[in-house]
Amino acid sequence: MSDGLQRIRFPKGISGYIPPPGFAPRATVANARLNELFNVMTSCEGVSQFKDIISKSDRKELQLMVLLLTSDSDYFTEVVRNIYGSRRVQKLLGISDDMDAFFCAAILRRFFHIITDKYASYVVIRAMLVFDKKKKYVMYEHLLHHALDIARNQYGCIALNEVITDADDPFYRNLLLDLVARNARCLSNEPSGNFVVQHVLTLYDLRCTHNVAVSLRGHCIDLSFKKYGSYIVEKLLDTEESMAVVVTELLECEGGRLMRLARNEYGSFVVVKALRVTHETNRVDLFRGLVQKLMPSRHLLLRSHGSNIVNFLESTI
């Protein structure tokens, strides 16, 4: 880069000087204008100055500003981890392919740390919407590589759900859905991963739902005893094929365990939904099987969380 390009002046006096590697934005720095750019991007008071820069800068000046923002990984990460920095970087995404190339490279260098951050993750979500196909494909590959760890993260699971929902490439969308389905058992028992499994089931992708049901076959009752696990099992009851997997497991378990589940604060909702969906879909074999297992001990349900089951049984007699 020429000296003239390095020293180009942005509106409000922001310099095009490139920060040295390992730049720490909170530390004292020699270049005050570099610090000023950081403040413009991350401070609450910098909103009007940022808007002024966007409106008055030509494409070359904006490109140099983006180059400055992305030339050091630590600097860029600190910017996007800030609530205002994240929002302002999102506004810079999609303006030009050249600028997006700088952003893409910067995101990929710290991909896992960015996508699992409360605010920085929204930069990835936005990038996956506005980047061209070539950049998206590279992002998808990184996402697939880290997907399970991202799914287990408090903020990463939210970002992963958003990317799956918005995915406009059928090939990569199916790869992501397949990965979640194959790992549904372990994810269902994770506080954050559980939300990813729930989310893919709300997409009503029959292939994915079937694959999740296959992965969870034999584990539905265990999940039903848990708050968030029961949510997953209830969602499996929403489609006919996966419903049969769940109800068959309920019918095959020994009576005492089914009764414990029916009296459980979470499991009772699974059992009553299983009764309702088999009744409404006219699956007489499955419905009668459940009734026959529950009726002999219905008196045990009355003074427990299973009272809703008794009410439903009596309404169908």
Image (cartoon, grey):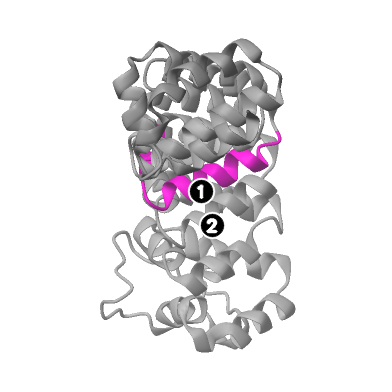
The residue shown at (26%, 81%) is 28
Measured Cα–Cα span from mark 2 to mark 1? 7 Å
Residue sitting nearer the eye, 304 or 277: 304
Residue 161 on the magenta segment: yes
Three-letter code, disc 2 = Tyr
The reply to whether residue 162 is in sight is: yes
Q: Secondary structure at mark 1?
A: helix
Mark 2 or mark 1, whichever is nearer to me: 1
**Residue 286: quarter of image:** top right
Q: Is residue 247 above or below residue 111?
A: above
Q: Badge 2, how many Cα within 10 Å: few under 14, some, many 20+?
A: many
254 shown above or below 138: above
Q: How many marks?
A: 2
Discs 2, 1 touching: Cβ within 8 Å: yes
- Please name the amino acid that badge 1 sits on: Ala
Residue 150 percent location from the top left of the image = 40, 41
Provide the residue span drawn in magenta.
148-168
- Residue 308: give its label: none
Q: Name the spot of residue 15 as percent of width and height, x first.
A: 51, 77
Residue at 43% in and 61% down: 76
Residue 159 - label: 1
Residue 122 marker: 2
Residue at image location 65% in from the left, 20% down from the top: 240
